[in-house]
Amino acid sequence: MDIQLVLAPDRELDPEAGEQLMLRLRAELSELDIESLSSLPGAEAPDGAKAVDPVTLGTIVVALSASGGVFTALIETLRDWLGRQSARHRISVTIDGDTIELERASADERRDLIDGFVRRHLKGK
């Protein structure tokens, strides 16, 4: 199962801080029991742009085995990571064309959204 993650950092961050944020997220994800972790480059920022568009930081592609436990651990890690951030970052998680955006919702709202998303994708496993 391949999962595509797109980190959209707070628009107030400068490009270097956004890159550091992406590196910290990748480092945390690399600690999980996943098959592979790779990056897809984002689009180039237009000339004269003051800030990088959030999507231009790129995309992380996570390959998981068929084990549902690893998928659940990945989603939990993303939820926890967002909860530890003080700025308004967003992560889009896409599986087979189904996307959920995780951002600054209450812990209960995030849990309910994530639980439904996880259940949808574990049904066939």
Image (tube, helix red, strand yellow):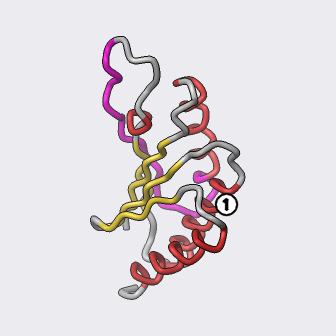
Q: Nearer the viewer, residue 47 or 21?
A: 47
Q: Is residue 2 left or right of residue 32?
A: left
Q: Position of residue 64 (x, y in %)?
A: 45, 66
Q: Which of 80 and 26 is in front in this view?
A: 80
Q: Which of 64 and 10 is in front in this view?
A: 10
- Residue at 70 percent of width and 45 percent of height: 86
Q: Quick one: quadrant of the C terminus?
A: bottom left
Disc 1 is placed on an element classified as helix
Q: Residue furthest top?
A: 48
Question: What range of the chain is rendered magenta?
Answer: 29-47
Q: Name the residue under label 1.
A: 80
* Quarter of image, res 42: top left
Q: Is residue 82 left or right of residue 53?
A: right
- Residue at 40 percent of width and 88 percent of height: 123
- In this rendering, the answer to whether 86 lies above or below 35 is above
* Residue kind at label 1, given as amino acid type: Asp
Q: Where is residue 33 in the image (x, y as percent from the top left)?
A: 58, 63
